[in-house]
Image: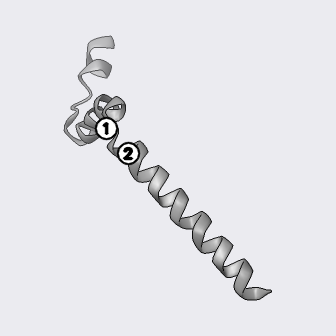
Amino acid sequence: MLSIFATILTVLVTITFVVIVIWAWSGKRKHDFDDAANLPFDDNTKEKEKE
């Protein structure tokens, strides 16, 4: 019984991993990830403009 549970869990984790990889590498997400990648270089100019 335990081996069946372990097998099902392994399959579910593998499927989840594959889905996350496909989601992360899809072209639709490129703009969002590019924006997130540039966050450390943002000098908060939007906040300075408000003042």
Comparing 17 with 7, the one in front is: 7
Q: Earlier in the sequence, mark 1 or mark 2?
A: 2
Tell me the colour scheme of the image.
one colour
Q: Nearer the viewer, mark 1 or mark 2?
A: 2
On screen, residue 51 versus residue 6, left or right, reads left
**Dot 1: element:** helix
Residue at x-position 32% and y-position 44% = 25
Q: Residue furthest top?
A: 50
33 is higher (above) or lower (below) than 47:
below
Residue drawn at x 76%, y 87% is 2
User: Dot 1: few (<14), some (14–19), or many (≥20) neighbours within 10 Å?
Assistant: few
Please give left or right for residue 4 compared with residue 40 in the image.
right
Which quadrant of the figure contains the N terminus? bottom right
Circle 2 residue: 24
Residue at the extreme bottom: 2
The amino acid on which the numbered mark 1 sits, given as a three-letter code, is Phe
Taking depth in this image into account, of 29 and 4 the one nearest to the observer is: 4
Residue that label 1 marks: 33
Quadrant of the rendered image containing residue 33: top left
The residue positioned 21% from the left and 31% from the top of the image is 43
Q: Quadrant of the C terminus?
A: top left
> Pointers 1 and 2 in contact (CB under 8 A)?
yes
Q: CA distance from mark 1 to mark 2?
A: 9 Å
Q: Which mark is residue 20?
A: none
Q: Amino acid at mark 2?
A: Ala
Q: Secondary structure at mark 2?
A: helix
Which x, y percent locates residue 48? Answer: 27, 19
**In the image, residue 30 lies at what x, y percent?**
29, 33
